[in-house]
Amino acid sequence: MSAYRDHAGRPIVAVTGIGLVTPLGVGVEDNWSALRAGRSGIRRITRFPIAHLRTTIAGTVDLPNEDTGAMCSSERVTRYATLAAEEALATAGLPRGAFPGPLMLGMPPVETEWPDRFRLAAKIAPTPPLYPALTEAATGLESLYRVAAFASVGEKLAERFGTRGAPIALSTACATGASAIQLGVEAIRRGEAEAALAIGADGTVQAEALIRFSLLSALSTRNDDPAKAARPFEKTRDGFVMSEGAACLVLESLEHATARGAKVLGILRGCGEKSDSFHRTRSNPDGGAVIKAMRNAIADAGLEPGAIDYVNAHGTGTPENDKMETLGMRAVFGDAAPPISSNKSMIGHTLSAAGAIEAAFSLLALRDQVLPPTINHEEPDPAITLDVVPNVARDAKVTNVLSNSFGFGGQNVCLVISGAPA
């Protein structure tokens, strides 16, 4: 077997660059040191008025010398993704304007947000602000179209970084970031590209999105102590904390990376997905799709479950998700389940960015042989019998990591990531 081909004869996919933007900071090393220390990035919301809201906390990204709160969501997505991609490309030693492959961008759905709707309503006053009148008022406003067009973010990033072909912009709920990585891996495996720029980004910490999640009873209301609010796998968990950020991975075939003398940071060894189409927001309580996604990823990597040393959890902190993930872990690994921890205990749920951010943290766990903790684990849930690496990071021998991403509507993607070859 060629050193550049995997067990199935496909090109091995290497990671040569990582970029990170989260509520913990901008840049890989600042994020990783904070995560290892168990520091929380959750804080009181200052971006918009919070009076009368049930949830008043989130994981917001503060950019230097910018009023991030004045941006619309797609502008924040563009800014976060740009910062993450610039860092990843610098790490990979690739030029910013001539990337040798396509862009795979995972991002949230884009819509006209309330500030723009209010401006349109003011424009047509005293006419009642019904949709026909708002639509007429918006006619010809190219700037509004450019903000709301889903694909425009990908086009801007593709132009900035010189990626090849049409950029792919996709959204698969909370699995979006992992889906972007999977698309990049598959393009390289099929021989369609030598490299791919995979980004997951989200900037939807804004009033309307927060209220929608709140109406679903999905958010934590532990507002008094924001740093203690995100409590994955813990008995008193009461929902996730909304957050934002971005991660970028530079993916290359191992042969391409080796030929140009790039430092390999890790291997994207396996991808698995499975949708259950059970409900618009809930997963099927039998856990079948979650279990199949994990098994598919491990099989795609050419491994057995016992070869997985650590699981980077989806771990949202909602009562239903954490029970479901526990059920899946027991079905896949039996009584010999490896340690599992949730980055969301510190950075919150970054939604469309989560799968990419957690893949990046998985690579760093492999690099430093350290398992990041699940913080705020004060009262164990007797129904969750997993080793959740409670409260304190742990040194450990790590060769293969399974990173789980389970999205609303039963959209599930899992990645198996291995350490760099010796």
Image (tube, grey):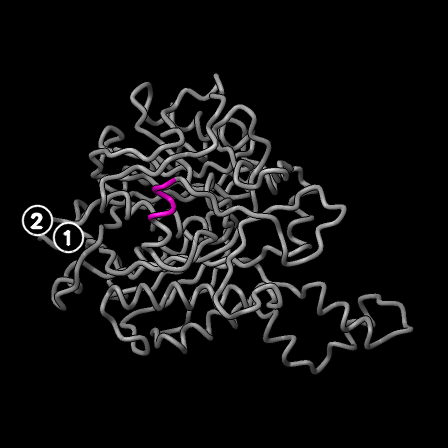
Q: Are dots 1 and 2 in contact, CB under 8 Å?
A: yes
Residue under numbered circle 1: 5
Q: CA distance from mark 1 to mark 2?
A: 7 Å
| Residue that extends furthest to the top in the rendered view of this protein | 382
Q: Is residue 151 above or below residue 190?
A: below
The x, y position of residue 243, in whole percent, is: 53, 50
For the point 40% across and 39% down, which residue is it?
38
Q: Locate residue 401: give its quadrant.
A: top left
The x, y position of residue 189, in whole percent, is: 25, 57
For the point 44% across and 25% down, which residue is it?
327
Q: Is residue 369 magenta?
A: no
| Most common secondary structure along the magenta stretch | helix
Q: Is residue 40 above or below residue 27?
A: above
The x, y position of residue 16, in whole percent, is: 23, 60
Under circle 1, the secondary element is loop
Q: Amino acid at mark 1?
A: Arg
Residue under numbered circle 2: 1
How many neighbours does mark 1 have within 10 angstroms: few (below 14), some (14-19), or many (20 or more)? some
Q: Locate residue 125: give its quadrant.
A: bottom right
For the point 56% across and 47% down, which residue is it?
43
Q: Amino acid at mark 2?
A: Met
- In this rendering, position of residue 95 left or right of residue 165: left
- In this rendering, position of residue 92 left or right of residue 380: left
Under circle 2, the secondary element is loop
Task: Give the residues in magenta.
Answer: 33-37
